[in-house]
Image (tube, rainbow, N blue to C red):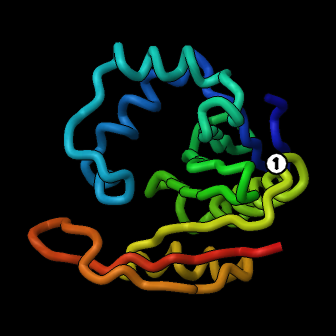
Amino acid sequence: MAILQGKNISLRALEPTDLDFLFSTENNELFWEVSSTQLPFSKYILKNYIENAHLDIYETKQYRFVICNANNTPVGLIDLFDFNPQHFRVGIGILILPEYQQQNYGSKSLELVIDYAFTYLNVHQIYANIASTNKKSIALFEKFNFAKVGEKKDWIFSNSTFKNELLYQLIK
């Protein structure tokens, strides 16, 4: 897949050299709540994942982009998932490493992927599931006119407490 390019940012495919980055990101317990992960991933599993990352989104129903800054340093990940060409929709999730937050990487990445999904995947809508406590993500998606269309009560159990999950949609 071609690189998606913006000002001081690029979104690219996973490369074999991303193994350590992916390993540290996927195994960081701070991120497990948003990914519904409960166990660490081995490098072997992640290496296999990277080796199959080239498969077509129409086959796998998902695609992960690595978000890179102007120096080509990975600063996060943005995923398209649950791609459904029959119903013209796709889910989106974004993770910016804490040390790179508040530097516009989330906004720039989301803008590029929204354009990509509507232009090249020909979707009618993009949706995001966001914990009601994740104020930064809510503000980011609302900035791009995603509308809150639902709330799942006590949907996420994390740190011994239940949290609501909000459903946001952007319809073309």
Q: Residue at x 69, y 44 (%)?
A: 69
- Residue 39 rendering spot, x and y as whole percentages: 20, 38
- Residue bearing the label numbered 1: 121
- Seen in the picture, residue 56 relative to 95 is either above or below; the reply is above
Asked if residue 94 lies left or right of residue 11, the reply is: left
Q: Is residue 78 visible?
A: no
Query: Left of 121 or right of it: where is 87?
Result: left
Q: Nearer the viewer, residue 96 or 26?
A: 26
Instruction: Locate residue 105: give its quadrant.
Output: bottom right
Which quadrant of the structure image shows residue 47?
top left
Residue 25 left/right relative to 79? left
Q: Position of residue 34 (x, y in %)?
A: 37, 58
Which residue is rendered at x = 53% and y = 24% of the image?
18
Amino acid tagged 1? Leu
Q: Position of residue 167 (x, y in %)?
A: 51, 76
Q: Position of residue 95 (x, y in %)?
A: 50, 54
